Image (cartoon, rainbow, N blue to C red):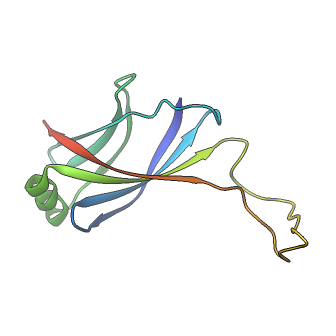
Amino acid sequence: MVDTIAIKRVNIRDLLSIDLDVWMEHPDDWDFKPRATISGNKFSIYSATTGKEMANIDLDDEQMEAAERDRNVELRVKFQVHGMHGRLNDIHPIIADGKAKKLATANWKSVQPIQFN
């Protein structure tokens, strides 16, 4: 299940594009079902499973115009798991490469409809 969601960046590309950092509780969790809503100029991400609001941000006029025009949002998600990702205190280089390696993070991109309230 999703622990926390942080909105990192809001851009306008072809659609309104929002970058999210999603922290999962366990590496085998697959329960991420985001739903996007806009109320006034507040953009919110809800969990479809629990109905709980996970993150929100205020949009400026240009971002609101793009959201109203397209009625869709592009979510660019970076998944991370507590206990697996975070600060790397001890760097253990891979001798063959000659440099330290980080754990891989899963990235996901999806276009979601926006529900206006």
Quadrant hosting residue 35: top left
Q: Is residue 115 left or right of residue 80?
A: left
Q: Give the quadrant of residue 97.
A: bottom right
x and y, in percent, of residue 24 in the image = 57, 38
81 w.r.t. 97: above or below: above
Left or right: 13 with respect to 86? left
Q: Residue at x 14, y 49 (%)?
A: 71
| Residue at point 61%, 54% (across, down) | 105
Question: Total of numbered circles in the picture?
Answer: 0
Q: Quadrant of the C terminus?
A: top left
Note whether 99 is above or below 107 in the view shown. below
Q: Where is residue 62 drawn, in percent x and y?
A: 15, 66
Which of 117 and 13 lies nearest the eye of the viewer? 13
Task: Choose between 27 and 55: the one closer to the eye.
Answer: 27
Q: Nearer the viewer, residue 106 or 21?
A: 106
Instruction: Give left or right: position of 6 versus 23.
Output: left
Identify the residue at horizontal 11%, vertical 60% (top origin): 65
